[in-house]
Amino acid sequence: MLVMKSLHRAWTVAAVAFVAIIGAAGFRATPGVLIMPLQDEFGWTRGTISLAVSVNLMLYGLCAPFAAALMDRFGMRRVVACALLLVAVGSGLTVFMTASWQLVALWGVLVGAGTGSMALVFAATLTDRWFVRHRGLVTGVLTAGGATGQLVFLPLLAHLVEAQGWRPASLTVAGAALAVVPLVWFLLRDTPEEIGLTALGADAPVVRTPGGGAAARAVRVLRNAARTRYFWYLAGGFAICGASTNGLVGTHFIPAAHDHGMPETVAASLLAVIGVFDIAGTIFSGWLSDRVDARLLLVVYYGLRGLSLLVLPQLFAATTEPSMLVFIVFYGLDWVATVPPTVALCRKIFGADGAVVFGWVFASHQVGAAVVATVAGVTRDHLGNYDLAWYGAGVLCLFAALMSSRVVTRVRDQREAAILVG
């Protein structure tokens, strides 16, 4: 009883957010599972299907900064509840589609906008409002929620697709997203001050005045941030992060493994294992972000990821070899470990605008993912394999490590100081 009384409400809010992020992650876990069934049923090329994935990823990123501003204006609870409803509607209606443009409209536009209105920018906003102490750790836990969604849904969806087809899998995701809406609406609170509390670890409550013009604020923050070199280093590195994770591995690992004779259910299980280790890696990265130079963490993460992708083409086989399992474990630990240090740098450099700036940095992440999702699909259509895509992503990750080493957190001149102040 004493333990329950001493538990700060911030932990309950974080738990609800974790479940919500899992719900949103469910549909994002399906592209790799559905590419082959859609190709078999409709005769669409991988490039065509990848275009829908690219639109999804693009909107998932471009909606993020506006969602952060909307959360400031209307509150997290309303924005996240509406986002989950959009995911449920978009994923549910896919069962009626008959043409590729409908795939783009539903899977790409509706679900992309819905998932883009929460996920990582939601985590950044929540931790900024509810936590002072343990902020990096909680950011890591919430970020890992996306991996948990992949872990929960991928094996289930793969078996559903194999046994009953892709339509039941889409309806399952729609139902899961819909089921989370009541939790968000009744248990999530926008700020601790709303219920007479202060953020965990804060000395005093913060008076927040909702601002008008969410879109205008998002654009204004981008304009100011884009005038600094730090923003472009962070955005460029994160674009490569998205290209090498969601865009390439998340979208094309299953069909690539299938090209080498591996059953889709086995490949989906391997991606789920990535999700398991991603949880550990991201939480640990959040813990490190409270203690270690975030710039150094990004250099290490991107560098190791690049080296692992350069090796991957030699590891594919019809069966799960030990070398592939080593890659899966290693890549899983590094999957989104980049998020907590990137959030920490945005917050440290840009202050009160840090969450919105991270929204734009995250938008670059999804732009990179969107471009590579299509490029990798077209590469496979024309060359018959994904080797060039793997090698290219590996080299880009090494370049991201170089860019991350150039980020500094101390303002060097008066002009930059004036820009960051606004």
Image: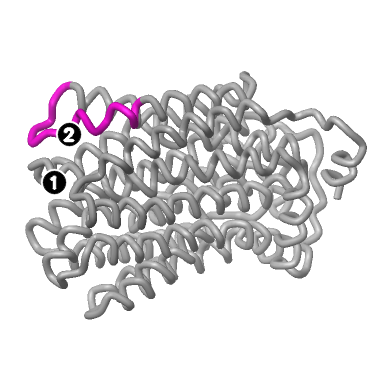
Q: Nearer the viewer, residue 272 or 178?
A: 272
The image quadrant that residue 197 belongs to is: top right
Q: Element at badge 1?
A: helix
Q: Are marks 1 and 2 in contact (CB under 8 Å)?
A: yes
* Residue 388 drawn at (x, y percent): 30, 41
Q: Earlier in the sequence, mark 1 or mark 2?
A: 1
Q: Categorize mark 2 by other alpha carbons within 10 Å: few (<14), some (14-19), many (20+).
A: some
Please indicate whether residue 28 sits to the left or right of residue 153 in the image. Answer: right
Which residue extends farthest right?
Answer: 414
- In the image, is residue 307 part of the stretch drawn in magenta? no
The type of residue carrying mark 2 is Phe
The image quadrant that residue 262 belongs to is: top left
- Name the residue rendered at 50%, 59% in the picture: 116
Circle on res. 354? none
Q: Nearer the viewer, residue 406 or 167?
A: 406
Residue under label 1: 259
> How many angstroms separate mark 1 from mark 2 (CA)?
9 Å
Q: Is residue 45 above or below residue 320?
A: below
* Residue 133 drawn at (x, y percent): 66, 30
Which residue extends farthest front?
Answer: 383
- Name the residue rendered at 64%, 57% in the picture: 68
Q: Element at badge 2?
A: loop
The colour scheme used here is: one colour
- Name the residue rendered at 57%, 28% in the picture: 402
The type of residue carrying mark 1 is Asp
Please indicate whether residue 81 sits to the left or right of residue 212 in the image. Answer: left
Circle on res. 316? 2
Q: Is residue 8 above or below residue 149?
A: above
Q: Is residue 175 above or below residue 322?
A: below
Q: Which residues are magenta?
A: 308-322
* Residue 370 drawn at (x, y percent): 43, 56
